[in-house]
Amino acid sequence: MVKGSLKRAAVLAVFGLAAFAAIALLAGGAEASFPQPWQLGMQQSASPVKENIAWLHNLLLVIITVITIFVLALLIYVMVRFRASANPKPTRTTHNTLIEIVWTVVPTLILVVIAVPSFKLLYFMDRTFDAEMTLKVNGHQWYWSYEYPDQGGFKFESYMIQDGDLKPGQKRLLEVDNRVVLPVDTNVRVLLAGTDVMHSWMVSALGVQTYVVPGRVNETWVRINKPGVYYGQCNQICGINHAYMPIAVEAVSKADFERWVAEAKRKFAVAPQDGNVRVAAAGDTPAAAK
């Protein structure tokens, strides 16, 4: 009777954890450039960095699932095998050399398996040594400003569109008046700085999350695999309007990017009389620049 209950409990535990892992893996593959209601897992990868992050995440999910199943089965076995009614005379055993060695060596090997790809990913994420263009990002309370030094140095500010100004199909708390536009299949060096307090420039689908610190310049990079609009937000608590400085990156073909740059140089030209940046109308996209 006890053995049958033990087997059923172990089987249910294994199937339950396996089902949860499968759901998380499948949900992570759902196409999305922004968070979805009831989403499990991560957004679909749109850059080599995010693909490597997703691979490491899936590896860790397998390792964690196996460890959890093993520990759960071990606990059930111990509770049943060594319960008081089955052991009226408790054992005097205090040490077991083989078990001591196993539970020291096995966790060490698991940590090595995790550490090797983790360090490789950290170095891969750090920077690119063959950048084809540069994007400068500045964090402010509470908006972003962007500069394209390789395309003539034009710059613009990017503010969240308020609820009352949203158009059909636009994402609340995620849409901005001026998106960052980048070409696909291009290594883009991203330089980040702040003007007041710490911010964090995070775009989940691109695998980018870098702190913006006043007084220094941080560097990261991105290479977008496919056209689309990828949304992010500042995830560093930077003040009262922390939740209202989203990021919208629009990836386009290289030809469309060149057309957008030509139009952006006129729209975001610096006025010589006062040096202020003239911000384009809300909703400008590469399609409008054709």
Image (cartoon, rainbow, N blue to C red):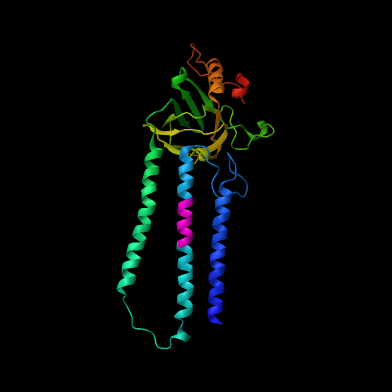
Q: Is residue 22 left or right of residue 116?
A: right
User: Given the current orientation, which residue lies at the most extreme left position?
Assistant: 97
Of residue 211 and residue 25, the one placed in the foreground of this image is 25
User: Given the current orientation, which residue lies at the most extreme right position?
Assistant: 168
Residue 237 seen in this snapshot: no
Q: Is residue 100 above or below residue 165?
A: below
Residue 22, located in which quarter of the rendered image? bottom right
Q: Is residue 258 above or below residue 127?
A: above
| x and y percentages locating residue 247 in the rendered image | 53, 34
Of residue 12 and residue 182, the one placed in the foreground of this image is 12
Residue 31 on the magenta segment:
no
Residue stretch rendered in magenta on the structure: 58-66
Residue 278, located in which quarter of the rendered image? top right
Quadrant in which the N terminus is drawn: bottom right
Of residue 2 and residue 151, the one placed in the foreground of this image is 2
Residue 120 seen in this snapshot: yes
Residue at 56% x, 64% y is 15
